Amino acid sequence: MDMTFGEAELAFQQEVRDFIAANLTPDMKRAESLNASVFSEPEAGVPWQRALNAKGWGAPGWPVEYGGTGWTPAQRWIFETECAHAGVPSPTPMGVKMVGPVIIGFGSPEQKNYFLPRILSCEDYWCQGYSEPGSGSDLSSLKTRAVRDGDEYVINGTKIWTTHAHNANMMFALVRTSDEPRQQDGISFVLIDMKSPGITIRPILTIGGDHEVNQVFFDDVRIPASNLVGEEGKGWTYGKYLLEFERGSGIASAKLRKALHRAAAFAESDATGRAIEDPDIAIRMSEAEVDIDALEMTELRVLSALQNGQNPGAVSSILKLRTSEIYQAVSRLAVDVIGTDGLYVEPTRPLHRLNAPPAIPEDELAVMPTHLNGRAYTIFGGTSEIQRDIISKLVLGL
Amino acid sequence: MDLTPSDEQRLLRESADRFIHETYTAKLREHNAKEPFGFSEGIWKQFAELGWLALPLPEQHGGIGGGAIEVGILMEAFGRGLVSEPYLSTVVLGAGLVAEHGRDDQKAALLPSVAEGTLRLAFAHAERAARADLARVDTTARQDGDAYVLDGAKVAVLDGAAADQLIVSARLANNGSGSLRLFLVPRDAAGLTLADYPRLGGGRACNLTLQSVRVAAEAMLGGDTDATPAVEAVVDRALAAMSAEAVGMMQTLTDKTLDYTKVRKQFGRPLAANQVIRHRLTDMSVQVDEARSMALRAALKADADAAERGRAASGAKAKIGKGARFVAEQSVQLHGGMGVTDELDVGAYFKRLLAFETLFGGSTHHYRRHAALSGRPV
Ligand SMILES: Cc1cc2nc3c(=O)[nH]c(=O)nc-3n(C[C@H](O)[C@H](O)[C@H](O)COP(=O)(O)OP(=O)(O)OC[C@H]3O[C@@H](n4cnc5c(N)ncnc54)[C@H](O)[C@@H]3O)c2cc1C
Ligand SMILES: Cc1cc2nc3c(=O)[nH]c(=O)nc-3n(C[C@H](O)[C@H](O)[C@H](O)COP(=O)(O)OP(=O)(O)OC[C@H]3O[C@@H](n4cnc5c(N)ncnc54)[C@H](O)[C@@H]3O)c2cc1C
């Protein structure tokens, strides 16, 4: 075992750096540095995904025959680390990282041919319709219904917390197609065109002042039956498979390290009265860094053990749990670093559209919104309490 | 020793709780957020009529002569309602500094107007380089004949734009002492620039710059003596008041979370049926209880000698800061998605408690001060 790079890996690292230098525009970079969310706004995320796709790097995790890169674990790690370090946008994972693997694993040849290229090119912008008002942690109790009517399904019900539904033209959703003794068995996985008649979207503002999530209502919405993925009644299996990707895909440690470096840069600036000289701040920086080191090693261990397209399993819950907790600790540290500048509320969204100088240093603008927005990290994709339940079952055998 | 409230204190609590319950609705908060100063002039007038502005001011200057306990009773209710009227900035800090450090003529000129609700004050002290260090002031006051000329910059001045007069701290520049002074500066003084902004959790604040701001020598608050002890005493009382306000917020959040988890069902049973949720709620309520004890301690010691007062005030700020963080974060977490929306006010309390933690230094700052005041080498 060793952690050093060979010549081929160093050459790849240079290739990634050159690609970023050639494709990351100043506008994208600014949008990303003032982005309070874990996902980028489409105006930054979409062009970045398109640039990646043009290079053949649109979906590194996919099998090569569908457009994956076939990278070694070391290459994936290098790629993610360089991207995080440079501050590239984070396109929403709903396409490449979520619905993509499900279509690859369970979709029909027609679905693969049609949707996969459109995911890679961002021609379709996806959102995830799982949660409902009455079905959050208890997802399998979901009530949104799809009733077969000839060549179509007719959908009625509502989804909530749908991230970027207002930006999306496609939704993948879990819907109830039958009532079974075990409620998981009556769930199907369908693809819904967001422009279908009968869909309405209600925006929901979150505590940081962002419009990211929505409630979506379905009123006799018709979709072609060919938009069913896999078999009717098997949606729960596909949906859970996807959740493992949502929770444990990619290399979160690189982004956390970038966030920590930014907090450290604030702490070393006069704008914060050189907060780093406060021994409490310095020690907390090291505590966060060590947590990130541990996470990074876990991610690398997992990455080494997995082959492309393999399903991550229970470790995805461990990664999600720790990533969300470290993310919140780092964002909180940044808040403590900027001190009373955190009291400043900037209502403009997205922040990068602000064109008057704020009352605090501009590069601090996203610190408090990031912290507020990040409180959702231990809630979305399955709450921390639910992750602990999963770990206790799957890892501890309880 | 007797820790039971007097009849007057009980009545004050009842009337404050009733007022907040009946008047200070989410709708009013929404309205206040759109007001130019972030609060309602009408409510401020009502505060004056209810005698709340006069409450802690000395009787010989139009006040009622109450103390930190009475202020704490009001502030706890204000915390429950997320009140954004500038009580802390005008009454506790502003009038508190005038009463503590001002000359008799200044008290007579200013305090009755504060009590009547016709004069608002703000304390412009914190500076960017100082972080939470109260002693670090780089703003200077240069004597120039019969006047002083102020130069410097201040941050996070609570309700500065709403104030008629700002109490600005500065160090004497040209008579060699570097000693701290406070000056009364009209908000529209020449050379004073305000960058006013909406404040996290409600109300407003501003950063300000002073460029050759000239004030008459009489505008110096008090005699020609160092203002540090007065600043420390008044800030300690503000910490006690803020601690009580935090208790009101923490209690409200805990109540709301308890109610929600009893009603919201997942997996066919209320969230609160899960032991992990029950224990979390228990820890929250223990934090509220300890916070209540520390806020009371800080209020009871608000007029004690400097070290004892400071240890109680910093102890309260430190401990309640940690507890507030726990209670606020868990309240959001246990509400799930609903907790991070603007549709419930859980998030509003979360943000106000975050502002509480940030103002006048966080928990570690205050543990460090506590240690120093206790003779521990830090
Ligand atoms: C910003 C954001 C973005 C989101 N994006 C999407 C999206 O794009 N698509 C989508 O489908 N969903 C999305 N979600 C929804 C998210 O998955 C749910 O919020 C989450 O699953 C929790 O459900 P809930 O909000 O109903 O909370 P609840 O399930 O009501 O949980 C409330 C609290 O109770 C706890 N709890 C619940 N059951 C138990 C138990 N058995 N034991 C112990 N504790 C328990 C929870 O951990 C939580 O703390 C998003 C949510 C947020 C906040
Ligand atoms: C130093 C000492 C002095 C003692 N003195 C006396 C004495 O004078 N007289 C006397 O009668 N007894 C005495 N005890 C016994 C003491 O009361 C028991 O040890 C105690 O009640 C726990 O019981 P247990 O040891 O059987 O542990 P268990 O009950 O087996 O508990 C083991 C662990 O499981 C946890 N646990 C158990 N049930 C639950 C649950 N429902 N939910 C969550 N967690 C749970 C416990 O909190 C504990 O962490 C003493 C014990 C000690 C260690």
Image (cartoon, rainbow, N blue to C red):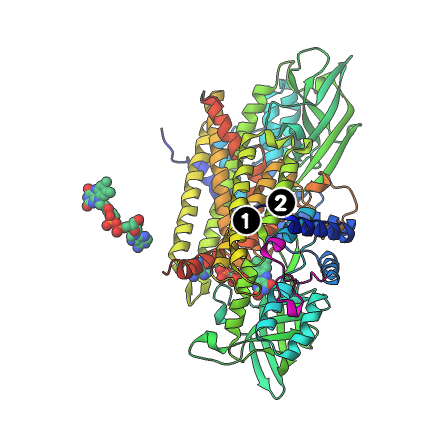
Q: Position of residue B255 (x, y in %)?
A: 46, 51
Give the quarter of the figure containing the N terminus of chain B: top left
Please say if B341 is above or below B55. below
Question: In this image, A276 relative to B364: left or right?
Answer: right
State the residue in front, B86 or B133: B133
Residue to which mark 1 is pinned: A296
Asked if the stretch drawn in magenta spans residue A364, the answer is no
Q: Residue at x 54, y 80 (%)?
A: A231
Q: Give the amino acid type for the residue marked by disc 1 in the picture.
A: Glu
Magenta: main secondary structure: loop
What residue would you read off at disc 2?
Answer: A259
Q: Quadrant of residue B63?
A: top right
Q: Earlier in the sequence, mark 1 or mark 2?
A: 2
The three-letter amino acid code for the residue at tag 2 is Ala
Q: Which residues are magenta?
A: A56-76
Q: Nearer the viewer, residue B127 or A163?
A: A163
Cβ atoms under marks 1 and 2 closer than 8 Å: no
Chain under callout 1: A
